Amino acid sequence: SSAYISGFSIDPTDPNAVVVTLSGYSAGNKVYVTTNGGGSWVNVTNTGLPNLPVNCSQIDALTGNVYLGTDAGVYLYDSQTTSWQPFNMNLPNVVVTDLDAQYSSGLLRAGTFGRGLWETQLLSVGLDEENTVSDLLLFPNPASDRVTVRTGNLLSRIRAVRLFNNLGQQVYNTANIPTDGGEDLVLDVSRFDAGVYHLSIETNYGVRTQRLVVE
């Protein structure tokens, strides 16, 4: 095989869970995972990755999401389809040599070859709802028209509202917070296709994310 180990990442919440990436051009031989400290390994290359070197990985400690830095940008593992999807929101399609998650700001930072350092929002899929939106109430959900977010006393501290589709692509971003005149944030979701989305609200205290279904 022309592949060699290019990097590894350890799950911050489970030292027995490790992702190993391989470089080279050996198709179907890019990413391996162990959940028992190396006792056994599973090839999770699956589908979706180009036959290009995979240079690094990052396991999100909050969600378990796995990101890859490749010679063609960043990829994210989709556990529902068991395939890799391009994660290109606000990121260039270039060689990515290093990845790092900044949990305090909710950002994924990517070091590139020749294009400097980039950052984008971490996709908060699988976050425990009680821990991530304890100060926020979203209704109705599912929704087809308007969604109300009851923010409590957080409205004045909201800096940005973003909506991502299930591929991690940003479909909505505003710093002009839409309200109902009170303490509720109101979003018109009628223009979006039906599907699963992730509503990300950035406050002075960090980023809070909740799953939203549009019908």
Image (cartoon, grey):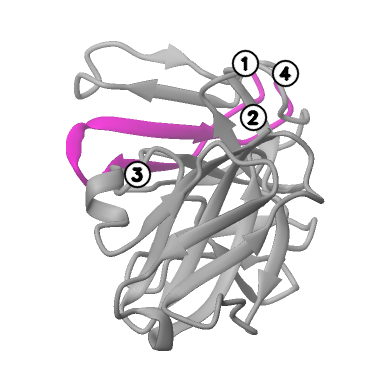
Residue 8, horizontal then vertical, whole percent: 40, 41
Residue 181, horizontal then vertical, whole percent: 53, 83
Q: Quadrant of the N terminus?
A: top right
Is tag 1's residue or tag 3's residue first in the polypeptide sequence? Answer: 1
Point out the frontmost of discs 1 and 4: 1
Decide: marks 2, 4 in contact (CB < 8 A)? no
Residue at disc 1, secondary structure: loop
**Label disc, if present, on residue 127 of the rendered structure:** 3
Residue 15 magenta? yes
Q: Quadrant of the C terminus?
A: top right
Is tag 1's residue or tag 2's residue first in the polypeptide sequence? Answer: 1
User: At label 3, which amino acid type do we have?
Assistant: Leu
Residue 194, horizontal then vertical, whole percent: 73, 34
Is tag 2's residue or tag 4's residue first in the polypeptide sequence? Answer: 4
Residue at disc 2, secondary structure: strand
Q: Which residue is found at the position 43% from the left and 53% from the top?
A: 138
User: At label 2, which amino acid type do we have?
Assistant: Trp
Residue identifier under label 2: 84
Residue identifier under label 4: 27
Determine if residue 89 is in view: no
